[in-house]
Amino acid sequence: MKRIFPAIVIWAIVLTNFSCSNVTTETVIPKVSNDTGPFEQKQFENYPMRVTDAYRIVGGDSLNLLADTIIQQYRDAVCLVFREGYVYFYGSSSIPNTKFPSHAQTFSLNIKIMLPTNMKYHWNTEKQTLIVRSSGSSSYFPIIPDGKEAYIDTTGVFFHKSMEEAQNSGKREQIRFIFNDVDPKLGAVSYHITMRPLWFYEREPFDLAHQRFVMF
């Protein structure tokens, strides 16, 4: 836990800096046009999710928030888990890939310690998407500022049904959250956070607390 905590703090600070405004903005949801079929909440629940892309968009300009190599290292320390309306996270670390094609990435997760965030989620029937809302503060992982909302861009959701399918398919799984806000200096700001699921493939030898996962 001592090794994981500094990583969580720095990564949380980066994401928390997405917004410093208390201005309320309306969440605009794009129309669903997904050729992979209707999006379902159960598609991604209970899977560890790793952030793979994070961009801040202002007008026609975008900033890659993961361009900093140090932040990339800290990003590897956290995987989110969506479960029964709450968002949690596991401590994570990269490990050598010795069993899968070279493009796959493998991780070791401490599945015995699932820590809470300040986020909850629910399905919005009218807008036909999942809404993630923060409530209060989180000393561990405050991604979205208190009282703010993010939503799933359902046009970009894709998940495989099994690890074998994910390994053999040429299509990458992903889910993208969008958080819109107003910054006092930048004006309208949009943050696009892409996450991809991890698949369990084996336990760590002689270690009941950790399991190994792969991302294709």
Image (tube, rainbow, N blue to C red):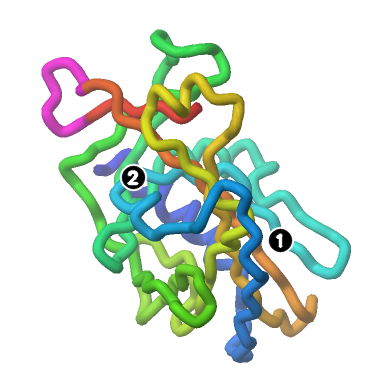
Instruction: Report the residue marked by disc 1.
Output: 56
Instruction: Report the residue marked by disc 2.
Output: 47
- Residue drawn at point x = 41 percent, y = 9 percent: 98
- Residue drawn at point x = 50 percent, y = 20 percent: 168
- Residue drawn at point x = 44 percent, y = 78 percent: 125
Quadrant of the rendered structure where residue 88 is? bottom left
Q: How far from the left and from the top, in percent, is residue 93?
A: 38, 32
Q: How far from the left and from the top, in percent, is residue 143?
A: 47, 65
Seen from the viewer's position, the closer of residues 101 and 42 is: 42
Q: Is residue 127 left or right of residue 94?
A: right
Residue 56 highlighted magenta (yes or no): no
Q: Residues within 10 Å of mark 1 (few under 14, many from 20)?
A: some
- In the displayed image of the protein, which residue is found farthest to the top? 98
The secondary structure type at the circle numbered 1 is: strand
Seen from the viewer's position, the closer of residues 74 and 206 is: 206
Q: CA distance from mark 2 to mark 1?
A: 26 Å
Seen from the viewer's position, the closer of residues 159 and 9 is: 159
Circles 2, 1 touching at the beta carbon (< 8 Å): no
Q: Which region shows up in magenta?
A: 203-210
Q: How far from the left and from the top, in percent, is residue 89?
A: 32, 52
Residue 205 highlighted magenta (yes or no): yes
Above-or-below relation of 199 to 132:
above
Which image quadrant: the N terminus?
top left
